[in-house]
Amino acid sequence: SQSQSQSQESQQPQSLAPLPIDPSLSSPILGTAIDNTTNVLLNLLRRANDRVSETDVPLLFEMPHTGAEIVFNILTQCYGLQPKRYLDPDELERARRQNVVDEYFVSSHDRPKEAFLNMRQRFHFLSTPYYQGGARLLTLKHRGRVVVMMRHPVVLAESMYLTMPGAVRGDMVGLLEFVTREDYYDNFLTRMLANVPAHVEVTEEHFKEARMILENKFLIGMTNDVAETVQKRLKLYFGWEELPSQQGCEMYYIKNGVMALPPVTIEEGGHYWRAIQKINLFDMKLYARAMSVFGQQKMRMPVHPLAVQKEREVVNEAFARLRNVDEPLDESDVPFFWHIPKASGTTVKEILSRCYGLVRTEMVKPPQSLDVYSKYILNVDLTTKESIEAAKNLGFIENGLADVVISQLSLEGATVFSSYHMGRAFTIMRHPVKLAISLFYYRQIATWEPTYRPEYKDISLQDYIELNGYYDNWMVRMLTNAKTGGLNDGHLDLTKSIIKNKFLVGISDHMPDTFRVLEKRFGWKEMKEGCVKEKLNRPSNSNKYPEVARGSKVWNVIAEKNKYDMGLYYYALELFGDVVQKMSDTAKMGMEVAT
């Protein structure tokens, strides 16, 4: 039957054949200019920074030689989405006349997954190498969400050259002759977005129009980072996920798709490279802007409600293994220290072991094991999701081998506990601006850390904060499982609830009071009187760096970038103040009773 045939066809990996670029065949991408309709088409595209609605139509712009077919295969084979794919301009025109979008589009979330087997004319996303033709299928009822894969213009030119008859890989002279022919389509992407015909020279105004479209209307992916594009952009943005029967499918297509891309033979920065750059000057500028937007979208892109819901489920499941702060302490409970980087964590670990004599987790010598080093360090690795899963299999919690569990991963770390051995969580917070400043200078010198970045010595603190992809609001992201994407007040409200109910909070600027609170809660006692005070007076792993004036320009920039962490920190200060005040009131009452 027709539906069975379509189903069988959809199960086969799809590959986008190289498109002809010889002008004698007429331009397959640029097509015929559509006069005075650019603004109309733009109105049919949603802004990339707006949250996706169920009426929005995903439009995969299959720009040739960029690895767009990898994304196509993942959408169809891994997520089970049904496409409308148009590789011919005449097909697009017929589809426009048939109004296929209004007639047949269905949301990828508005169905049981079994319905994919009998979609007939219905579809979940559009896919075409003809940007303007694809956009013309959209309507005011069903606007578009454009996804594009970007590749370096020089590499793209070489890939296009290799599709020509008689082209030889590594023939730089032939490549240069190709890009200097009169019929070569220079500044390919700029022409396409700004609708510049082949016989018209591209100008700065065309570039500005193309840049505006790219940065406002497109969700950008990168050919040199397909895994990041798929797993940390598309899935969160559209709320897609692998079908239960297709686990591991994404990485299969990513790995094999990237390997299938032809290797680059042109020498980067060499004579031929620079010559092609010059010819494609506006595309080079557009690519540079795309890389910048790609970095920005990682932390700012709106996350689909279904992806948020999944994040919440992970949060609820993990923190269900932690006792509530107001519950009485049970002898089977295990303290869990959520270690926030550069918030006195190393000093805390020293005090736990050297002053209280507690066995704590930290991998000293790989591979992780149940060996204990220096009397107080259990050789367990809780630094990554994968290592935590391996540590759970060691059974160190069930066997009572650790007095304190320590991890920078609040969610994943909480999963080591069970309904019998519940976690008792505490953490030490630091002012987010001070933390960001300290971390910037620390990463310049910490050669022993995986996060060591010597290149940071060559940039200013403000440049660091304004880097594309700067990881803002670390605490809120860790607690809510929103590792990438935009944040909102809902994330902050959730973290406040988590901190209030699940974590005993200390403050790095008030360490003496913090340890008095911890001693009271957990019943810890110094093995040698004055040990804690001595360690606090000589903090471990501290680094010296220039002070930044509170209220200065760079201080305010950091505070704004981390506004949700700022809100969480000030809320934690209130909680901490209440605990300290209650302890003080209780102590006064005890003194009055004694007298």
Image: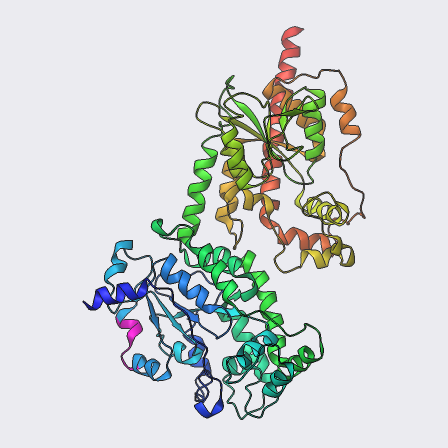
Left or right of 496? Residue 145 is left
The residue that appears at 37% across and 57% down in the rendered structure is 79
- Overall secondary structure of the magenta section: helix
Q: Quadrant of residue 408?
A: top right
Q: Which residues are magenta?
A: 97-103
Query: Quarter holding the C terminus?
Result: top right
Q: Quadrant of residue 210?
A: bottom right
Q: Position of residue 352 (x, y in %)?
A: 67, 24
Q: Position of residue 204 (x, y in %)?
A: 62, 84
Q: Is residue 128 above or below residue 404?
A: below
Can residue 112 be seen here? The reply is: no
The residue that appears at 55% across and 61% down in the rendered structure is 225
Left or right of 179? Residue 5 is left
Q: Is residue 197 above or below residue 450?
A: below
Q: Position of residue 74 (x, y in %)?
A: 41, 60
Left or right of 504? Residue 525 is right
Q: Nearer the viewer, residue 307 or 7?
A: 7
